């Protein structure tokens, strides 16, 4: 099974991806956790360029760099883990490109979808958890973190982040069979329990049907 976490800045994706991976392992499930961009030597270098680098990066170049990092982590980590029968939990995936570079930056969604299909080899998540919260609240959460965790995307204007959030909600509405939208303003423990309930149902459905990667 392939599970991804998506959401605007400050929603708690990294925290809850880690909590879910821990819970899966405690339940006896073999689990691999990855993040985007990163997760491979190439991806980690691209991450620095994209998030902390001081180079000017055009919108199309930005999208393609994300896709390059994604293609690498798919080849090196995600697909091998799925082929071994493991569960993969990803902190961001292809939907981030549609939300941030498509809805946020204004790149053509159809063109982005073609690039993503090539980069991902058509691999789609079985379950995508959208941690949703108001943009201003998410950015305020990020401001409370150490300065080194603040990146150039969080410095964008509020309207940009609002477009990203609206993009995520549009993506979730278009594919309700794989998305679950949860209120990220809940207490951490309550939100982790809600996520676990969604994952358990997904695992049970896959087991009951005799199909899926789980």
Image: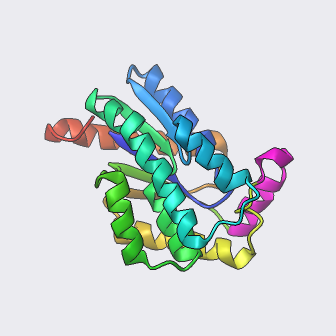
Tell me if residue 140 is in the magenta stretch: yes
Q: Main secondary structure of the magenta part?
A: helix
Q: Residue at x 73, y 54 (%)?
A: 53
Question: What residue lies at 28% left-to-right and 55% top-to-bottom?
Answer: 122
Q: What's the residue at 27%, 34% (across, down)?
A: 214
Number of marks present in the image shown = 0
Depth check, front residue: 61 or 155: 61
Viewer-proximal residue, 8 or 36? 36
Farthest residue toward the left?
210
Whether residue 182 appears in this view of the structure is no
Q: Quadrant of residue 183?
A: bottom right
Q: Could you tell whether 179 is left or right of 148 in the image?
A: left
Q: Position of residue 6 (x, y in %)?
A: 52, 55
Horizontal side, residue 198 vs residue 123: left or right: right
Residue 186, image x, y percentages: 64, 51
Magenta part of the chain: 135-150
**On screen, residue 147 above or below 189:** below
Image: 94 above or below 15: below
Query: Is residue 175 or residue 42 the one in the foreground?
Result: 42
Task: In the rendered view, tell whether residue 30 sits above or below residue 134.
Answer: above
Q: In this rendering, would 91 be left or right of 135?
A: left
Q: Is residue 153 left or right of residue 82?
A: right
Q: Position of residue 11 (x, y in %)?
A: 64, 54
């Amino acid at each position: 099974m392939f599970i991804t976490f998506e959401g605007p800045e400050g929603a708690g994706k990294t925290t809850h991806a880690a909590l879910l991976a821990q819970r899966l392992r405690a339940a006896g499930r073999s689990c691999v956790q990855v993040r985007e961009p990163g997760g491979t030597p190439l991806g980690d270098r691209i991450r620095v360029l994209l998030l902390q680098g001081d180079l000017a990066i055009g919108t199309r170049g930005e999208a393609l760099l994300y896709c390059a990092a994604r293609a690498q982590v798919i080849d090196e980590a995600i697909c091998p883990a799925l082929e071994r029968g493991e569960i993969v939990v990803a902190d961001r995936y292809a939907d981030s490109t549609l939300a941030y570079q498509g809805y946020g930056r204004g790149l053509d969604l159809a063109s982005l979808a073609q690039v993503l299909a090539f980069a991902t080899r058509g691999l789609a998540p079985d379950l995508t958890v959208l941690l949703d919260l108001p943009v201003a609240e998410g950015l305020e959460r990020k401001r409370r973190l150490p300065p080194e965790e603040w990146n150039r995307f969080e410095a964008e204007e509020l309207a940009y982040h609002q477009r990203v959030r609206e993009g995520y909600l549009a993506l979730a509405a278009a594919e309700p069979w794989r998305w679950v939208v949860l209120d990220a303003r809940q207490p951490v423990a309550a939100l982790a329990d809600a996520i676990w309930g969604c994952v358990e149902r997904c695992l049970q459905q896959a087991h009951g049907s005799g199909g899926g990667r789980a």
